[in-house]
């Protein structure tokens, strides 16, 4: 749902558009689907799946008019594997379908739509798992999975028990559950040229909850210096304070300013402490990145 437009969705008896200002469950956008005919909807691009494997798909849905319908099918053989629907209007809710792919199924397709000719709903966070190990390359900047001190530089969480709208107040809340490190493994030693590569076991994906990776980004690769810290550059004030402190210790004739420069260096480290230190479990201060769901 986070793409720039709705061009990756194919409509049949419906219109769809990305919504970035109204009803969004998470991220920057949701998909607003409005039927112009009975049984219409927006279908995803077909994606590869494994024959004879069980599956579980979930999606966040907010019906606005009529009955919303969530369908999983085989576009090549015109088969519907599973579908579910909801008539509970103006409330974000989880819709889930389960089943087993057929022996001749190699591709799957998701359809988000409705029953009536005027049905309308907002959709977000569509997630799917089937009973296979899942290999995922992480962002290219994540070039280490342990620090120089031997501490883990990343953690993987479940995003559980997600809540939606309460009365007239739109709320987004969830509980975090730490994924057992035994349920994933490092396949590729990361470096400046190779991103970190994870393989998730069935134990990590069977619950179908979206996954969050919390990672610490070192300041080893400064890139373009910024006024303050962000995800792509070292904080300028910290770099300048460190340089002044180092220069003061090397140039003895500048000793009268050295206490002030050391004080500035300590102060700037405190300002970005959450970026330099990995927080405790469930204390998600500092740098983290995106949910593993569309």
Image: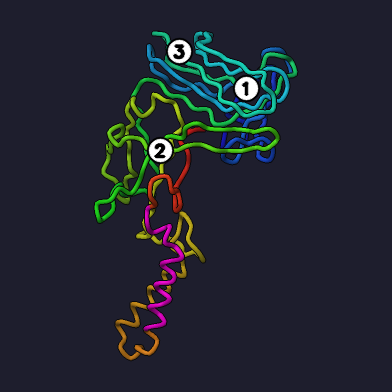
Which mark's residue is nearer the viewer, 3 or 2? Answer: 2
Magenta stretch prevailing secondary structure: helix
Magenta range: 259-278
Per the model, the C-alpha gap separating discs 1 and 3 is 21 Å
How many numbered dots are placed on residues in this image?
3
Residue bearing mark 2: 157
Q: Is residue 63 left or right of residue 197?
A: right
Of pointers 1 and 3, the one earlier in the residue sequence = 1
Residue 99 image label: 3
Comparing 177 with 136, the one in front is 177
Comparing 24 with 143, the one in front is 24
Residue bearing mark 1: 42
The answer to whether mark 3 and mark 2 are in CB contact below 8 A is: no
Q: Is residue 211 left or right of residue 64?
A: left
The answer to whether mark 1 and mark 3 are in CB contact below 8 A is: no
Element at badge 1? strand
Q: Is residue 196 left or right of residue 223?
A: left
Q: Where does residue 193 sit, x and y in percent of width and height?
A: 32, 48
Q: Where does residue 159 sit, x and y in percent of width and height?
A: 46, 35
Comparing 114 with 279, the one in front is 279
Per the model, the C-alpha gap separating discs 3 and 2 is 25 Å
Of pointers 3 and 2, the one earlier in the residue sequence = 3
Quadrant for the N terminus, please. Answer: top right
Q: Where does residue 212 sit, x and y in percent of width and height?
A: 44, 39
């Amino acid at each position: 749902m986070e793409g720039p437009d709705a061009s990756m969705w194919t409509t049949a008896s419906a219109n769809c558009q990305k919504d970035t200002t109204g009803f969004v469950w998470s991220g920057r956008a949701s998909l607003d689907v409005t039927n112009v005919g009975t049984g219409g909807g927006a279908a995803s691009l077909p994606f590869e799946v494994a024959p004879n494997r069980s599956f579980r798909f979930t999606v966040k849905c907010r019906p606005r008019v009529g009955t919303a319908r969530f369908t999983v099918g085989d576009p090549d053989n015109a088969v519907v594997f599973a579908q579910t629907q909801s008539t509970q209007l103006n409330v974000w809710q989880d819709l889930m379908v389960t089943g087993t792919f057929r022996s001749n199924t190699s591709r799957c397709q998701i359809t988000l739509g409705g029953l009536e000719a005027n049905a309308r709903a907002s959709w977000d966070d569509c997630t799917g798992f089937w009973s296979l190990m899942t290999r995922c390359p992480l962002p290219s900047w994540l070039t280490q999975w342990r620090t120089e001190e031997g501490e883990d530089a990343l953690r993987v969480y479940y995003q559980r028990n997600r809540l939606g709208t309460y009365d007239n107040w739109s709320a987004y809340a969830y509980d975090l559950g730490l994924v057992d490190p035994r349920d994933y493994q490092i396949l590729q030693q990361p470096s400046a040229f190779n991103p970190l590569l994870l393989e998730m076991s069935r134990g990590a994906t069977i619950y179908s909850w979206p996954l969050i990776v919390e990672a610490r980004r070192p300041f080893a690769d400064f890139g373009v210096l910024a006024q303050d810290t962000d995800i792509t550059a070292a904080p300028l004030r910290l770099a300048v304070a460190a340089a002044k402190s180092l220069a003061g210790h090397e140039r003895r004739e500048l000793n009268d300013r050295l206490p002030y420069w050391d004080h500035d260096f300590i102060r700037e480290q405190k300002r970005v402490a959450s970026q330099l230190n990995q927080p405790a479990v469930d204390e998600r201060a500092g740098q983290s990145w995106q949910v593993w769901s569309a």
